[in-house]
């Protein structure tokens, strides 16, 4: 499996890594679902990109819920992006279907691999896997609702994509610079053990 390396460990570095991994898709209208503060916009290349960020809360350009359908017509955007989003939804199947519905050409997603090495070590020693899991004392809207491996994420995206008329045309592991420097080669052989993120690019069938 191909390995993509982010230039830094923070959110901006992850966005830069994704943009650099798929340089040919950033053209026309781009919808960033689960955009948070909209930082993806700042790393998009060129002047041919028109960006729209959607999230549950401001400062998104559009307020909307991916599980309640997206407030756009079919095939409204050339590229639809959902980075670390689907695992937060209750209805992950409907969420991915909605991404595909509004995409004219591409859908780009990342999903976490909870079976990677650091998570296994944390689980072995009784430590919390991350702040997105556990049993909080007060209700929260921001938490992971799914627990799956990279293999499962890959199979899920391929199957659901086909059902919506999309094919996975590129995929791989997205890792940070430290992990990339030390064991990039090993990640490609054991992605389910060593990669924290699965990244997939889907293209609508019949679109070149």
Image (cartoon, rainbow, N blue to C red):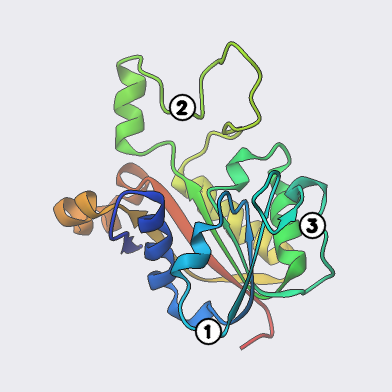
Quarter containing the C terminus = bottom right
Quarter containing the N terminus = bottom left
Q: Which residue is mark 3?
A: 70
Tell us which disc is closer to us: 1 or 2.
Answer: 1
Q: Tell me where residue 145 sits by quadrant.
A: top right
Tell us which disc is closer to us: 1 or 3.
Answer: 1
Residue at the extreme top: 137
Q: Secondary structure at mark 3?
A: loop
Q: Which residue is mark 1?
A: 47
Q: Residues within 10 Å of mark 1 (few under 14, many from 20)?
A: few
Q: Position of residue 188 (x, y in %)?
A: 29, 58
Residue drawn at (53%, 33%), measured in percent from left and top?
A: 147
Residue drawn at (38%, 72%), measured in percent from left and top?
A: 20
Badge 1 or badge 3: first in the primary sequence: 1
Q: Which residue is mark 2?
A: 131
Residue drawn at (69%, 44%), measured in percent from left and top?
A: 57
* Residue 156 left/right relative to 74: left
Residue 186 in view in this figure: no
Frontmost residue, 26 versus 134: 26
Q: CA distance from mark 1 to mark 2?
A: 37 Å
């Amino acid at each position: 499996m191909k390995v993509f390396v982010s230039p830094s460990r923070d959110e901006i570095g992850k966005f830069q890594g994704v943009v650099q991994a798929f340089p040919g898709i950033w053209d026309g209208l781009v919808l960033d679902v689960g955009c948070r503060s909209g930082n993806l916009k700042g790393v998009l290349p060129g002047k041919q990109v028109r960006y729209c960020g959607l999230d549950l809360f401001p400062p998104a350009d559009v307020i909307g819920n991916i599980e309640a359908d997206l407030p756009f017509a079919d095939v409204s955007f050339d590229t639809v992006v959902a980075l670390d989003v689907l695992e937060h939804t209750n209805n992950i199947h409907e969420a991915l279907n909605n991404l595909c519905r509004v995409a004219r050409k591409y859908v780009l997603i990342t999903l976490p691999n909870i079976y990677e090495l650091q998570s296994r070590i944390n689980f072995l020693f009784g430590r919390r896997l991350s702040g997105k899991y556990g049993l909080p004392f007060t209700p929260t809207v921001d938490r992971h609702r799914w627990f799956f491996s990279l293999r499962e994420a890959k199979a899920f995206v391929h199957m659901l994509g086909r059902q919506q008329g999309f094919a996975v045309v590129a995929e791989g592991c997205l890792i940070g610079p430290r992990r990339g420097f030390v064991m990039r080669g090993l990640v490609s052989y054991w992605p389910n053990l060593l990669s924290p993120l699965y990244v997939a690019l889907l293209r609508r069938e019949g679109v070149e």
